């Protein structure tokens, strides 16, 4: 059974960089696409971006200038960096696996989510 | 930019059929999937590729997609189905979510 676990600081100061890691267990990170998705408190889901195990990425245009997603296949994990954060970036951040490769896929496995608060 | 529109809320009586819509321009030409999210939990995939149910999802969950609207249907709705539901599709190689629908079973 594939499991995903997000980790990282729960509190980030405004203008600084949010960094999270998703550790994949129970399966290989290879041959799949992986995404980061966030959900502000009391609001809906917002896709941040995805990475293929080869390192190929694609980002939400609204966040593209501030986002970097990377992968470390040797550690079976992938990471998110979001710079110049503001209070609007406060959210539960989820990592998730794409069910199929490429365009049109859904997310079949999700992490439990981690709340990141942006505050001084 | 492409948008997916869902009604904010839907109410249904126990045992009845609930229908949740998701609308977008020519949505029927795209694959749509649906997630169920209960308070404090991660989203759970309940329908993918318009009509398919993942293993373990009850048969009372079904989906359709035609024209500009995709629909999630829950037949014989149970109290445990009360949750937020989100549709999801792709456009121009990016992932889109609908705004979510709160299903109340009363």
Image (tube, rainbow, N blue to C red):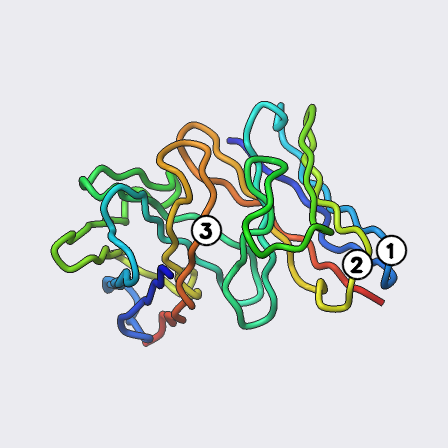
Residue drawn at x 33%, y 41% as measured from the top left = A59
Q: Earlier in the sequence, mark 2 or mark 1?
A: 1
Q: Quadrant of the C terminus of chain A?
A: bottom left
- Relative to A84, is B70 above or below? above
Circle 1 sits on which residue? B16
- Relative to B65, is A21 above or below? below
Residue drawn at x 82%, y 56% as measured from the top left = B76
Label 1: chain letter: B
Q: Is residue A103 left or right of residue B70?
A: left
Label 3: chain letter: A
The lab-note entry on whether marks 3 and 1 share a chain reads: no
Q: Nearer the viewer, residue B43 or B80?
A: B80
* Res A110 quadrant in image: bottom left
Circle 3 sits on which residue? A108
Residue contact between numbered discs 2 and 1, judged by CB atoms under 8 Å: yes
Q: Is residue A102 left or right of residue B58?
A: left
Q: Is residue A43 left or right of residue B7?
A: left
- Residue B1 location in percent, x, y? 51, 31
């Amino acid at each position: 059974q594939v499991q995903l676990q997000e980790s990282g600081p729960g509190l980030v100061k405004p203008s600084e960089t949010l960094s999270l890691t998703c550790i994949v267990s129970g399966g290989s990170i290879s041959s799949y696409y992986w995404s980061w998705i966030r959900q502000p408190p009391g609001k809906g889901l917002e896709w941040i971006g995805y990475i293929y195990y080869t390192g190929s990425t694609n980002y939400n245009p609204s966040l593209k200038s501030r986002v970097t997603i990377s992968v470390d296949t040797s550690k079976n994990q992938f990471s998110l960096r979001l710079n110049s954060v503001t209070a609007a970036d406060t959210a539960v951040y989820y990592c998730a696996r794409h069910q199929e490769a490429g365009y049109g896929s859904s997310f079949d496995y999700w992490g439990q989510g981690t709340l990141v608060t942006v505050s001084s | 930019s492409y948008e997916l529109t869902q009604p904010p809320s839907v109410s249904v009586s126990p045992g009845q059929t609930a229908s949740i819509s998701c609308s977008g321009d020519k949505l029927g030409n795209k694959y749509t999937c649906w997630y169920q999210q209960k308070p404090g939990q991660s989203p759970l995939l309940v329908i993918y590729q318009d009509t398919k149910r993942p293993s373990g999802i009850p048969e009372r969950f079904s989906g359709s997609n035609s024209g500009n609207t995709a629909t999630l249907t829950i037949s014989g709705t149970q109290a445990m189905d009360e949750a937020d539901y989100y549709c999801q599709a792709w456009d121009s190689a990016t992932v889109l979510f609908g705004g979510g629908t709160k299903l109340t079973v009363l």
